[in-house]
Image: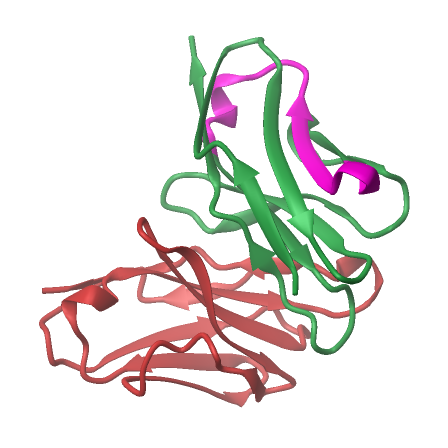
Chain colours: A red, B green
Amino acid sequence: DAGVIQSPRHEVTEMGQEVTLRCKPISGHDYLFWYRQTMMRGLELLIYFNNNVPIDDSGMPEDRFSAKMPNASFSTLKIQPSEPRDSAVYFCASRLTGGSTDTQYFGPGTRLTVL
Amino acid sequence: AQSVTQLGSHVSVSEGALVLLRCNYSSSVPPYLFWYVQYPNQGLQLLLKYTSAATLVKGINGFEAEFKKSETSFHLTKPSAHMSDAAEYFCAVSRGRSSASKIIFGSGTRLSIRP
């Protein structure tokens, strides 16, 4: 398996622009998580899905952030409009619940810079 | 609520020396505990996990951790550090396999290895 795939790996944009981050989870995994990592706040859980349904979005910082999972193999995290304080590394992770594989697998991350 | 506290944001050891990274947890239910490693510009990788079986858990790359309920600790150790162990290490806790479970990460400990 190719693991969790994220695109783009790097994104540089200007304040006010819309940013869309993409994630393809490991095939067959039933949970998908979006995290944000910054030096100041560490690793924060933004939102997670179970079987494509959002379960907990309490970590989403503002209404400017939205996430969707239209099917089991694809999710997006959108920021509109973006602000410089959104600059961070955004990770997607997936998990298969049950058995010995009850573990989160992380993608390589998207480094977002908002100028 | 679950939480983890990692003692020491930065640990430096000499190559060949013992590595000890400290983690204490708080959980109202029997926890699942994890150690993840993050190499520069990469996502997090699972090192090992405790899921209520053996209290001494062996992971990849020669790391192990011991679950001590009386001390609410899950410290990570490696007998002999290697230069390739330089990375950031995250302790994490979850409620287990329940549908509401999510992993809560500590703030991380950066491990440096001196030649």
Q: Is residue B82 magenta?
A: yes
Closer to us: A60 or B115: A60
Closer to us: B72 or A68: B72
For image coordinates 65% across by 60% down, the residue present is B2
Relative side of B31 to A51, left or right:
right
Relative side of B58 to A10, left or right:
right
Relative side of A36 to B103, left or right:
left
User: Is B14 above or below relative to A91?
Assistant: above
For image coordinates 59% across by 87% down, the residue present is A52
Closer to us: A80 or A43: A43
Rendered image quadrant of residue A64: bottom left
Location of residue B51 in the rendering, given as x and y in whole percent from the top left corner: 82, 52
Rendered image quadrant of residue A105: bottom right
Location of residue B12 in the rendering, given as x and y in whole percent from the top left corner: 45, 19
Confirm whether residue A108 shows in the render: yes
Confirm whether residue A2 shows in the render: no
User: Is B53 above or below relative to B9?
Assistant: below
Location of residue A1 in the rendering, given as x and y in whole percent from the top left corner: 62, 60
Image quadrant occupied by the N terminus of chain B: bottom right
For image coordinates 31% across by 66% down, the residue present is A8
Location of residue B15 in the rendering, given as x and y in whole percent from the top left corner: 51, 10
Report the magenta residues as a range.
B67-87
Image quadrant occupied by the C terminus of chain B: top left
Q: Is residue B97 magenta?
A: no
User: Is A104 above or below relative to B109?
Assistant: below
For image coordinates 59% across by 29% down, the residue present is B21
